[in-house]
Image (cartoon, helix red, strand yellow):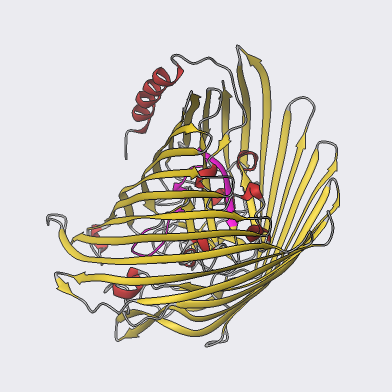
Amino acid sequence: MIKGKQTFFMFGMLFMLITTSGWSAEVDNSAATFTLGEVIVTGEQQTVNLATTVTEVTSSDLELRGAKNVSDALKLLPGINIQTAGNNRSEQTVSIRGFEQSDLKVLIDGVAIYSPYDHMLDLSLIPVDSIAKITITKGASSVLYGANTMGGVINIITKRGTSKPQTDITTSFGDYGTQNYSISHGGSSDKFNYWVNYTFRESDGFRLSSDFDEHSDKFGIGSNLDEDGGKRDGSDYTKQSVNAKFGYTPNDNSQLYLAINYVNNEKGIANNDWEFSDWQQWQVSLLGEHRFSEQLRIKTNIFYVNQDNTLRDTDLSNRSYFYKSGRDNNSIGGNVQAFWNVGEVNFLKLGVSFTRDNSQHSEIEKKEDSWNDIGEYESDIYSLALEDEITINDWLAVVLGTSWDYYDPRKAESNGIDQPVPDSDSSFNPQIGVVITVSDATNIHASVSKKTRFPHLKELFSDMVGGNPNLQPQKTTAYEIGVAHQFSPSIDGSVAYFYNDVKDLIFRDHIFQGQDEVSYYRNIGSSRIQGLETTLNADIIEHLTAGFNYTYMLTKDKETGRELEGRPRHRANLDLRYDFSCGLLVSAQGSYTQRQFYTYKKNKKDDGTWTKMPDYFLLNMRLEQQLPAVAGVDCKLFLQLDNLTDKNYINYDYLQSGRSFLLGMNAKF
């Protein structure tokens, strides 16, 4: 592991020397949101956002829920389920309304972030310290987001420099050597502004629930996991990240930003005898906007994303795959978007985007061997999108959109031998949305959209997991209808029904030929995902606020007649906050998950058994005490308690953390 303490303090001292010199200690507590990173600016209440379900998580929400990373930030939202160990790498991924993360698009400031190999990303790697807000768009998301948005879009919007200089420092500590440090500074000078953050997190691991049975046939001693309780084996990590943004605004009509994100993560992998001895991601993007007139503006974004990771086998006595496996993933591309207000009726939007994905794989078979090139895969994707928001009158608005998406697999090489590359494919994806404003308190929305998800490089070409170059794209027709109502100045709520008719769902199958397991990807004929989302927010009494959401989801694989794996039937979340007059803020979050299935395997050669995961209820709490300001420094102490009841629960076959705590302090000046 990296010598984290030395790295943090050396960086921190340098950071403070640079950022505090020449600046006054005057605080602007309203962190500026980087709106240039929003494809569709939610603050403008554009019709395309009103015609479907859009959920926002603010920086205040992140703080009060004690979120340390993006997966924490999304846990309590309607229609969302955080999954762990749906693969072999103990990654935390998200599903939206039954669609897995590989079926949706995750962006940071408008740039898609994923592994080009399998389109996955461990959301626990992205810290929240530089996040201004997170926008989740479901159903008929704007066609300007480009291809592969079947399950929706998550756009993580980071902070930019504030009008006044601001420094933010947070430290916290927990059990098993858990320690977190974060330092941020932002400001502006004349036409320039900047924001810089460094975050360091380290832990020896997490504790399993005291109710965990070490003699469990599924998870205990002698089982496939061979877990003996106490600290979870392979749950240690060291994470470092840097987020920087530099802006130039020469006048009121133009702005240009350079954004840099870097993540370095070393971690154990709890369900396997593996570890990520190296995991790094770089994202560099150049974003610009120019307003030619009150009616016309153009936005551009050029980006480069690199992921470089090494997976190492830690148990050489029982090695069955490799000693080390490395991937070098790259994405490069850009987009141009035009926004044109055509009078008072039409708001036209045009988007053009291009992305090239490249994934190179190498391995060391034995410890004494050197790296060997195993394979290289590459593909291009183009998207042309047109959208028109039509305001018919004061109570009726319509949004019409369509995209033409083109997928071109370019290269497939395995052990120096060229593999068959499928022909290019394209898809035409129209959609329509309607917004009816019944009154100032009530509006109704409805939408129908066609969405397509092209096969990923892993699904097409991987020899190890059964790549199939004959795969067809996934397709769905998504329907949604909903209503939002303001019952009173202090109470509002919403309800939405969604239905997805999915064709050619890409599925990984497993069969045994003698003693050998054979995996391969194939298209399932069709499946169905439907459900209901409800939300209710209320200021119950003075200083007490509550937020509640419930999601009912019914899924079916029409080929097998079973429910789709890892999709809970019921999820309910409650968020309570009470602000005492003495400066103490108490918040509590409860979450209930019921009825979801997965394939349990006793060992790697087991055919697997269709198994229901246990239902569970989780309770988290946070206490935050504001301290008197001293010398212009605002300070507060906090105590974060997760899984307060020490619930023993799993997600798939991954044992989750028991009760844990973090004690920390935050200072702003």
Q: Residue at x 72, y 62 (%)?
A: 550
Q: Is residue 289 above or below residue 606?
A: above
Q: Is residue 39 above or below residue 241?
A: below
Q: Closest to the observer: 293 or 19?
A: 293
Q: Is residue 598 visible?
A: no
**Which residue extends farthest left?**
369
Q: Residue at x 83, y 55 (%)?
A: 441
Q: Quadrant of the N terminus?
A: top left
Residue 428 placement (x, y as % from top left): 48, 75
**Which residue extends farthest top?**
631
Task: Report if residue 533 lies within the magenta region.
Answer: no
Q: Residue at x 63, y 71 (%)?
A: 432
Residue 492 placement (x, y as % from top left): 80, 53
Could you tell whether 251 is left or right of 119 in the image?
A: right
Residue 55 placement (x, y as % from top left): 64, 54
Could you tell whether 46 is left or right of 486 in the image?
A: left
Say which quarter of the image contains residue 508: bottom left
Could you tell whether 364 is left or right of 525 in the image?
A: left
Numbered range of the magenta stretch = 115-136
Could you tell whether 594 is left or right of 240 in the image?
A: right
Q: Is residue 507 visible?
A: yes
Q: How many labels, in total?
A: 0
Task: Report if residue 125 lies within the magenta region.
Answer: yes
Say which quarter of the image contains residue 377: bottom left
Q: Quadrant of the C terminus?
A: top right
Residue 30 placement (x, y as % from top left): 62, 31
Q: Closest to the observer: 280 or 226?
A: 280
